Amino acid sequence: MATLATRARRPGALARWREVLLRPRTLVAAAITVVVGYLALIPLVYLLWTTFSDAQGFSLGGFARAYGDARIGELVGNSLWFAAGAAVLSLAVGTALAYFNVRTDVPFKALFFAASIIPLIIPGILYTIAWIFLASPTIGLLNSLLEPVLGPGTFDVFTVWGMIWVEGLHLSPIAFLFMVAAFRSTDPSLEESSLMSGATRVQTFRRVTLPLVRPALLSAALIMGVRSLESFEVPALLGLQNGIYVFTSRIYQVLRSFPVDFAGAGALAVGLLAVAALGIWLSNVLSRGHAGGTITGKGFRPRPIDLGRWKPVVGGGILLYFFVTVLAPLMVLLYTALLPYYRPPSAEAFASMNLDNFVAVFNLPSVPTALRNSLVLGGGAATIVMALMAVAAWVVVRSGIPGRQLLDHIAFSPLVIPGLVLGVGIAFVYLRSPLPIYGTLLILLIAYCTRYLPYGMRYAVSGMQTISAELEESAQVSGAGWWSTFRRVLLPLIAPALLAGWVYIFVVSFRELSSSILLYTPGNEVLSISIWELYANARFGELSALGVIMVLVLAVLVAVAYKVGARVGLKS
Amino acid sequence: MSRRSALASLGAAGLLLLSGCGGAPTSGPAPGSDQPTAAEAVYAEVDPLTGAARHDRLVELAAQEGNTLSLYTSLNADIADIVVPQFEQATGVHVDVYRADSETVLQRTLQEASAGFAGADVVETNATQMAIIATQGLTGDYEGEQRNKINEQFRYEGWTPTRFNIFAPAWNTNLVRADLVPHRWEDLADPKYDGILSLEVSDYDWYMTLHTYYEQQGMPAADIDRLFADMVQGSKVAKGHSGQVELLSAGEFGVVAASYTYLTNKARVNGAPVDDQPFVEPVVARANGAGLLRSSKHPATAMLFMDWMLNDGQKIILDNGLTPAVMPDGTDPLAGHQVLPVDVQQLIEEGNDWSARYDELVRGGEQLPEK
Amino acid sequence: MLTISNLVKSFAGEASRRRATAGRVLAVDDVSLEVGEGEMFTLLGPSGCGKTTTLRAVAGLERPDSGRIVVGDRVLFDGEGLNVPANRRGLGMVFQSYAIWPHMTVFDNVAFPLQVRKRSQRPGKREIRERVAKVLETMELGHLADRQATKLSGGQQQRLALARAIIIEPPLMLLDEPLSNLDAKLRESLRYELKRLQRELGITSVYVTHDQIEALALSTTIAVMKEGNVLQTGRPREVYETPNCRFVAEFIGTSNFLRGRVAAREGDRVDIDTEAGRVRLESAARVPVGAEVLAAVRPESLEISTTGWGNRVNEWPGTVTNRAFLGDAIDHIVRVGQGSLRVRGNPSVSIKPGTEIFVATEPGKVTLVPVG
């Protein structure tokens, strides 16, 4: 190849720029960037502004107060330990399950669907409370079951390990969904050729399969880690008990004191941001130069690997996982819901069971409104975010527009802003906006869209990355314009990823609490608020009943969504 | 997408952006400004009225305001769910309730006020948070016959108590014989309570109040500290007052140093072997209350609610096992007791210090897990 | 039909590629080509030679830095602001991976280019159905119209990709290594299929491949590319028989090269002294006596004899050092003088290594290749 040293300004450079700038795709990209930027940057700008300013102007006082605390080292340590632990646990479990599900003839495949979706549906509060009922040293069911053998208090959920356990299990379905997509899009012949080279299954998994899904794995690790860092319910319910602080619970505490030290809380949030940015950087460095498998125009039919004599072992593992992540928490919720008041299982306890709590839930005045609002917000946020992100993912992955990575970073930023800070920021802005948004459902919608942008982006981008560029180019050459290509080729191809993202956002919207609590107004309650209310008032029976109802409703809705979704996109 | 629709979405995005930045933080009346608001004019007009004239005037004005009310409260949902519908039934006013814990209610009120947003008409929450809201100048004056019946020590400026939390030692009547029934707070320091006394982990307001009381009595600081240290010596530290009373009922320990009297009473009514009578004097009391906002858009309706709350509402409070600010017969529930009010101003100013000191203090006891 | 003039395309230098001082690498360096009506024009070259970039520039998928691309009388790119987007060029293209849309049926894949036309130019539903059916019939895919595109075999996918490219009856069809994903047998049969179709339909085509046999078999014209430049353009036979440089001679087919000096020249007749002895060849090139040159001769142009002819111009004695049976032919490696020649012959004549033999060729079958 010849080289080009210096070259005079090319003729028509100006015309070329005009043409590029006025192309519909450029305009669409600009519009999307503006919308995403608007959603994501408002809380960020608010956060930075409050953190670095006081009455006199620029100030680092917040940092001095937040990080001058003697226990700050412990706090950072706890946060990292907790986040890393939960990420590792969820990834290990999720990846193993995804591999078995996609690549092997593992039994009980039907359970995977439930195991992958139900923990998502159970709100963090409920899931954590369920685990308190199961593994609290004093009232934990598991502890009372094991007491005759191992003595009292075998498990203690109120420790960092307990936090990691609960958060890790709660996150594992997300890791599972992520890795399922990755395994599905890599060519099994790559593994087969490794087996033919004489590698064992374990070697093949380690040397071929894992490196192939490495980008997805890193991406998932990043999301799991950052999510755990940002997680609030688990550290608040399990950690505060024994004074185990992490960033979010400390921010929560700071925000509740008076006068509120916004700068101090902001400084902590900025610390969180820095840790997350480090994670993103690390993930980028590690995934550099590793291309994932891609869907090409050629189809392949994955053939499941025969597990042979390991089949019963793996099957048993699957059953155990299903029991631990799904059945046990649900059963303990149902158990609590049926009791007039909580007590350990006994003949009398079972005799006293009735449906009073369920009746009471339906008689709560706010529940029907909350259910409707949650449905509207979940569906609305999921649809808006996925619609935006479908285009944004194209901009980031395919458009070739200079600076497109910026959009990726912007869309990612809300991930590291704790929900509480986001709520404060959004309330601050819209209280001062002339548009009547504060005090309506719309402000919650904006908050949800902002909070779930990063997830939508991740789903859409990883979907887009698996589509070979030639599929898009062939549509262009066939005469399709940008919009036709997008609508008729790209959209259907990434539809499975978009649908997965939609379901995820829909489901997690139901449990969004930390922003909602600051932004909801009477009449605009959502289900998570109702649950929080019941929790705050220690009405565990009704809380469990509402939890059971919510899980059932969501399970039905998600099943319907998947049924509908199976009709669109790739038929596997 | 066509070029035109792309342009349109760009424009819409721009509009949104502008709207986000457009409103300056100074729009609306600044909090704490001295200029009387429209709501204050109504308060000033109705405050002197009494009896039927007052009621009729409020009903008339409330109707003009549309018979709707926005209430921010940290009242427990089970009580709020009784109080609010009863008020709605009695007056035909529709109430929008924002219910959250007291810290959130405070934050929301302050944030809305700083933006000049008229959110709440009435805020009902704990003493500390009410006092902050009042000292920020967000509440208007409320006068009336019922307010005048409230114990004089609790007639705060800018807000009015609606119920009391009273701290008093409680004991398990099966475990504690007559010789162990405490009569003075100092009794609890006696070694005979070692192993049977329980403290609660968040009672720093009680600690602050009693500590300050002893100081005012002229007790040397060292003695006071020894007194509390002796109390903690051999004690069991519980988390949460409700659970503490349950454990007391179950006989986990014999005496609770500072129990909420309404919780003790509720347990006793339900047949648990617990008692707190006669109260150990002086009783430590903290008020929960409500204030009318100066920015209210429904000032008359807000007053109507306040009047009702201090009248019929008090009976509901009492019936649900709480201590009303005024007994339904108009008497003072604290009458006949020597009362030590928790000094909310002191709490605002020194609360964090006292909280830290109390944390340090109770670390000496046996920590019980949350019930 | 297609005229490419002075096409230049550079890419930002990537770490894996060679860096230029300005940080850019020229993928296509001043390429000019002329493709005639109805031609099957092949861009041939090793990977990275710029052939695919040239094709994509014609398709509108890459934006050249400068140059001019004209199809028929329509200017598609002129380097001065005019750049017709890919979707308005109205060309057909077959991708290396076929790029069959996996979410559509066979029918939908082929109908797509018609369906996405502007409303005013879009044929009616019925016409679309008929045209698609006709094309599918031509491609022998008619019975598979409703099948999901991913459920086709490799050869069927290939034909489907072709069907999609020709449905709009484009003035120019672009094929980017369309056979490289197929197994050898299928590749061979599809090669002739492709040639037949191209002739029947008369569509001017530009074909990119790195497979010289494919290029020779299919093309009416071949352009050999290397490092962004076109080295030689010509009929397949021309390029094969008279390569204009060593690269072309080496890249297309197998050649024996004999290094030597021009000893005498008389009109077109040139005598060269090589390591193997004196070689006579015919060349119009005016090389001076004494110049250093290469003589190239194809293995199949060499004859072998155990007895020798005695009267031939180019006849050299030698020794067989090795032999390889190829099925339809047999190769003997023969040491001649200081050089070594590969001789391809009928498999019925197989000579043991070590045997003394004679090798000969006609002067017209030896090519003079400029050195450098």
Image (cartoon, helix red, strand yellow):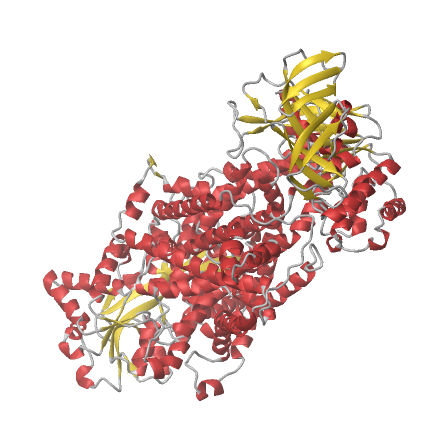
| B172 relative to B70, above or below | below
Residue positioned 62% across, 27% down in the render: C337
Report if residue B80 is visible in the image: no
Residue C196 appears left or right of A395:
right
**Can you give x and y, in whole percent of width and height, for residue A173 in the image?**
52, 62
Report if residue B342 is visible in the image: yes
| B31 relative to B238, above or below | above
Q: Nearer the viewer, residue B69 or C363?
A: C363
Q: Quadrant of the C terminus of chain B?
A: bottom left
Q: Quadrant of residue B3?
A: top right
Residue A71 appears left or right of A215:
left
Q: Nearer the viewer, residue A44 or A400?
A: A400
Q: Quadrant of residue B367?
A: bottom left
Residue positioned 55% across, 29% down in the render: C12
Q: Nearer the viewer, residue C315 or C331?
A: C315
Q: Quadrant of the N terminus of chain B?
A: top right
**Can you give x and y, in whole percent of width and height, for residue C325 in the image?**
70, 44
Q: Quadrant of residue B291?
A: bottom left
Q: How many marks?
A: 0
**Can you give x and y, in whole percent of width and height, for residue A468 in the image?**
64, 45
**Can you give x and y, in whole percent of width and height, for residue C218 in the image?**
79, 36
Q: Nearer the viewer, residue B349 or A6?
A: A6
